[in-house]
Image: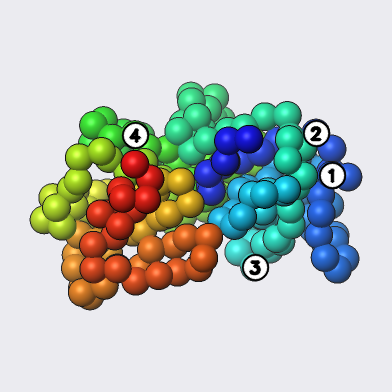
Amino acid sequence: MERIAPHTLLKLKTVTDLIFTGDLPEWVTDMLAQAPYVIVRRGQQDTQIPIGIRGYQKNQRFAAWLPLGAWQQVITPQAALKYLPQLAATRQTLAAFQTLRQITPLLADYQWGVGGSLQYELVTGLPMARAASDVDVIMTLPPKKLTPAMAKQLVTTLKQMSQHVDIQVVANEYGFSLEEYGMQRSTEILVKSNQGPQLFHDPWTFIQERCD
């Protein structure tokens, strides 16, 4: 079975398929009753998929697992953008969603989508984004490598937006911050993976070699 990338939303067939330890918090039950969607986390996908459930508050995060195939719909960050025209007019006035529209032409040369609270709201219709929400961009690793200088130029342009735009460059299980890569504040860049965070001088080449 093909792996499902982190940041992907899955619509459950039934909440009874959830696998978890301990007790299920009441807020989790309430959230799944409103929208039966979960978010794929990093981790091994041998017999089950690691997923997370988010609530309205930042501290409301719950880790669980799903058996393979226990979902009826898969929504990638790229696919979530298609829901933007359906967003209620009152929600489209939020700075985060306005910024999302403004950056679309700037990222026309890349394969990308939206993650975080904006992704969840676009797909579920629940008011998850806030006035000060960041715009979490999930960008597929471009086949042509960006130099740190090129990345810095893009990040600098996006910093002119009203809301902070955070770009995660991803490929399969791996991901790193384009801002961290472009600004070169450190000689090593943090790369997220199934084995946990790792530091690399050249995360781009490291990921390309493992995903080609």
Location of mark 4 (residue): 111
Secondary structure type for disc 2 = loop
Location of mark 1 (residue): 17
Classify mark 3: residues with Cα within 10 Å, few (<14), some (14-19) or many (20+): few
Which dot marks residue 67? none
Q: Are marks 2 and 1 in contact (CB under 8 Å)?
A: yes
- Dot placed on the residue nearer the N-terminal end, 3 or 4: 3
- Dot placed on the residue nearer the N-terminal end, 3 or 1: 1
The picture places residue 157, in percent across and down from the top left corner, at 18, 49
Secondary structure type for disc 4 = loop
What is the spatial separation of the Cα atoms under label 1 and label 4, in whole angstroms? 32 Å
What is the spatial separation of the Cα atoms under label 3 and label 1, in whole angstroms? 24 Å
Q: Are marks 3 and 4 in contact (CB under 8 Å)?
A: no
Secondary structure type for disc 1 = helix
Location of mark 2 (residue): 13
Left or right of 75 in this view: 174: left
What is the spatial separation of the Cα atoms under label 3 and label 4, in whole angstroms? 31 Å
Left or right of 36 in this view: 163: left
- State the residue in front, 6 or 163: 6
Which mark's residue is nearer the viewer, 3 or 2?
2
What is the spatial separation of the Cα atoms under label 3 and label 2, in whole angstroms? 26 Å
Q: Residue at x 26, y 72 (%)?
A: 188
In which quadrant of the rendered image does the N terminus lie?
Answer: top right
Residue type beneath disc 1: Asp
Location of mark 3 (residue): 59
Q: Are marks 3 and 2 in contact (CB under 8 Å)?
A: no
Q: Quadrant of residue 201?
A: bottom left
Secondary structure type for disc 3 = loop
- Dot placed on the residue nearer the N-terminal end, 2 or 4: 2
